[in-house]
Amino acid sequence: MAITDAPRGAGRATPNAIESALAQFDRAADHLDLAPETRAILRVPKREWTVNFPVSMDDGHVEVFTGYRVQHNMARGPAKGGIRFHPATDLDEVRALAMWMTWKCALVNVPFGGAKGGVTVDPRKLSQNELQHVTRRFATELQGVIGPEIDIPAPDVGTNAQTMAWIMDTVSMHAGYTVPGVVTGKPVGLGGSEGRADATGRGVMFTAQRALREAGIDMNGATVAVQGFGNVGEAAARLIHEQGGKLVAITDVGGGVANPNGLDPAALKLRLSEHGTIAGAPGTEPIDNAGLLSADVDLLVLAALEGQITANNADAVHARVIAEGANGPVTPDADPILADRGIVSVPDILCNSGGVIVSYFEWVQNLQSFAWPADQVAERLRQVINGAYDEVSAMRQRDGIDARLAAQAIAVARVAEATQIRGRYP
């Protein structure tokens, strides 16, 4: 099972993820002139859990792991959000990611609230058997917290379809019957949706294509750098390559590769499966994270982790368009620097929303015990994400604001409306 991600940027800690998420929310709330009581409700998570659980390792010793699940807001429906396995995962990061999920779901108008979860662990250091034990025990700790009508997890950094299969099976064993809708991003043979594996990357491709076109650049022939070659980055790179984009630099957790004449994503995927990293692939030159972020390209895809471009390195970015395939990869202090330099950034809650859109499709299919073909899933995804892109563009032009503020304002307004209509209990 290949599990990959990219390293955090050097300036990631300033500000951290929750500070960035709150700064973005406050900016949107100010633009909307949000009522103080509504602002107070939306600024904090509804519920959060921290669990510590023991796992027997292959050599017989016991390790205690820490896991988290945060439900930020459920005014518009059950909570939705991924589970990540990463050594740097902590509660503040999960809080931020849960808040971003709330806005993402609202922006693309799927009937979910936002959640996120994670375990502080490096999955690359565990055997398949140990990964399964960690996953199943964590799922057991979340018994009663997750469920098809409560909170539906999905894959994230360091997790994949197999992880979701273990969670589904664990929940089903406790329930005494199969509960396919408890997670999305499952293998197709267990009720997963056709097209889910590529959904986030496909959404990145669709939105990047639109942004490039608005900048007067055709994706066919555009030079592209991709940070991260995991679930999102690999799919985005492959789909952009299929549209004629020239991949000139890619990094993953083990290093990076560059070739001005173009890189073959299929060959790099094979390299990854054989060596655990794309670094050192034949016919390439090495490139580090800083080199990739400063590459002179038409399109920079950020598909790793949050906090990659900050005020410390924004001046070094030379891409024409940034596609935020990760959550929070550009910090608020970097936004004005990029804008002043004419660099367009497709905001994360729009750019990487393909995953939650198709997760919604999967959830609906599970509830209906019905499956849609891959081409229908891809077309529905295209329609939904392009519709959201149009709404963001319209508000941006009407109010004279940047795309991130427009996306956040649309999303926050929808959640605020649902919160106000529902009222307060008791």
Image (cartoon, rainbow, N blue to C red):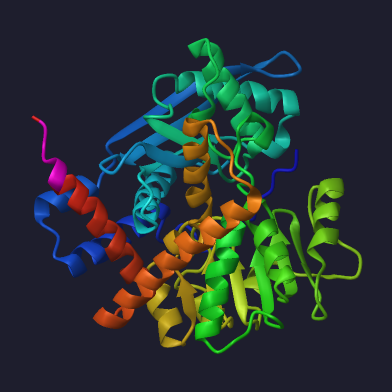
Q: Residue furthest top?
A: 176
Q: Position of residue 251 (x, y in %)?
A: 71, 63
Closest to the observer: 238 or 115? 238
Please state, as top left, top right, bottom left or bottom right, where the N terminus lies in the image. Answer: top right
**96 relative to 36 in the view: left or right:** right
Q: Residue at x 73, y 76 (%)?
A: 244
Q: Residue at x 35, y 66 (%)?
A: 407
Closest to the observer: 233 or 172? 172
Q: Position of residue 400 (x, y in %)?
A: 28, 83
Residue 424: within the magenta?
yes
Q: From which residue to which does the magenta span run?
A: 421-425
Q: Is residue 400 visible?
A: no
Please state, as top left, top right, bottom left or bottom right, where the C terminus lies in the image. Answer: top left
**71 relative to 203 in the view: left or right:** left
- Residue 103: quarter of image: bottom left
Residue 355: within the magenta?
no
Question: Where is 348 relative to 114, above or below?
Answer: below
Q: Residue at x 68, y 69 (%)?
A: 240
Q: Give the main secondary structure, helix, strand or loop, of the magenta stretch.
A: loop
- Residue 36: quarter of image: bottom left
**How many numbered discs?**
0
Q: Residue at x 80, y 55 (%)?
A: 269
**76 relative to 382 in the view: left or right:** left
Question: Where is 328 relative to 43, above or below?
Answer: below
Q: Position of residue 272 (x, y in %)?
A: 81, 51
